Image: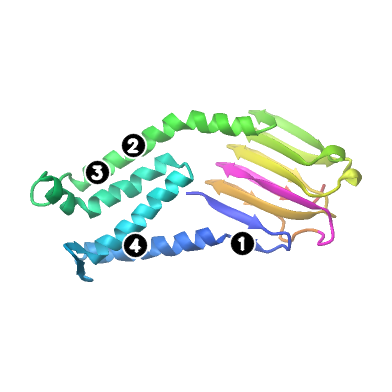
Amino acid sequence: METKVVTTSDGKRSWGWEHVFWGIVFLAAAVLIILYATGVNLGVIGEIPVIDLILGVILLAWIIRCFVKVQIPGVFLPLGLLFCVFEKELAQWFHIGSNGKILNHWLVLLIIVLLTAGSALLLRPLRLKRKAAQAGRVNKGSSSTMYIDCADFHSESIKNELGATSVWFSNKDSYQGGGTLYVHNELGSTVIHVPQEWRLQIKITKELGNVVVPDGPGNPEGKLLTIEGHCELGNITVRADG
């Protein structure tokens, strides 16, 4: 599960409406699963319990979200849970299984784990290839210092993998503002040194990684720098000391 750190240009941090929405949805789903497991009856629509229908809608929305985000390995967990919720109905409709049971739920869990792990391993090379293609400068397995020339800086991409990368800005007086720095950090450490007189807007997602950003937006009247990117199993640090 990815989380997103957003620092707006006025210095306020926001997690985005999507995270709030899905947080509420998952909490509601947890309550419904408890009710489902304890046999609480909220009524029936047709022949299907209301709890099953609500859980089905939530799980279906989860599956659609995974496809929209192209997170194929994430599809199998909600798909397996959807199977468990409607297993009885599926057994009746297709005349398979016995006593409303098709598969042992532990076997379903094992299948989910294997499908998730297998698809993640198969799709990982494509994911890394796509990310590498997006990165203009790449540091892999070494210590590196990169300089961005502000005299001609509008957009720059940097990828750090299994290394330590420091990013500095040169010719700062020539910077016109409005530039965007894209950073991808994987199993490494990336430190971005930003001039104190600039204004910052930071949008970085993280997956089992750590992101450290300044508490404030910098100079409210300063030239705007946008930093976007992703941190996976590593660290991205933004320092206003450049």
Q: CA distance from mark 3 to mark 4?
A: 19 Å
Residue 136 position by quadrant? top right
Q: Mark 2 and mark 1 in contact (Cβ < 8 Å)?
A: no
Report whether 169 appears left or right of 131. right
In the foreground, 143 or 8: 8
Q: Which of marks 4 and 2 precedes in the sequence? A: 4
- Whether 230 is among the magenta residues is yes
In percent of width and height, residue 96 lies at 11, 43
Q: Secondary structure at mark 2?
A: helix
Residue 218 position by quadrant? bottom right
Q: Identify the residue position indicated by label 2 in the image.
A: 115
In percent of width and height, residue 34 lies at 28, 64
Q: Secondary structure at mark 3?
A: helix
Q: CA distance from mark 1 to mark 3?
A: 37 Å
* Residue type at the position of mark 3: Val
Q: Identify the residue position indicated by label 3 in the image.
A: 108
Q: Identify the residue position indicated by label 1 in the image.
A: 14
| Residue range corresponding to the magenta coloring | 219-237
Residue 30: mark: 4
In percent of width and height, residue 146 lies at 77, 34
Q: Which of marks 4 and 3 precedes in the sequence? A: 4
Question: Badge 4, how many Cα within 10 Å: few under 14, some, many 20+?
Answer: few
Q: Secondary structure at mark 4?
A: helix
Residue 113: mark: none
* Residue type at the position of mark 2: Leu
- In the rendered image, is residue 33 in sight? no
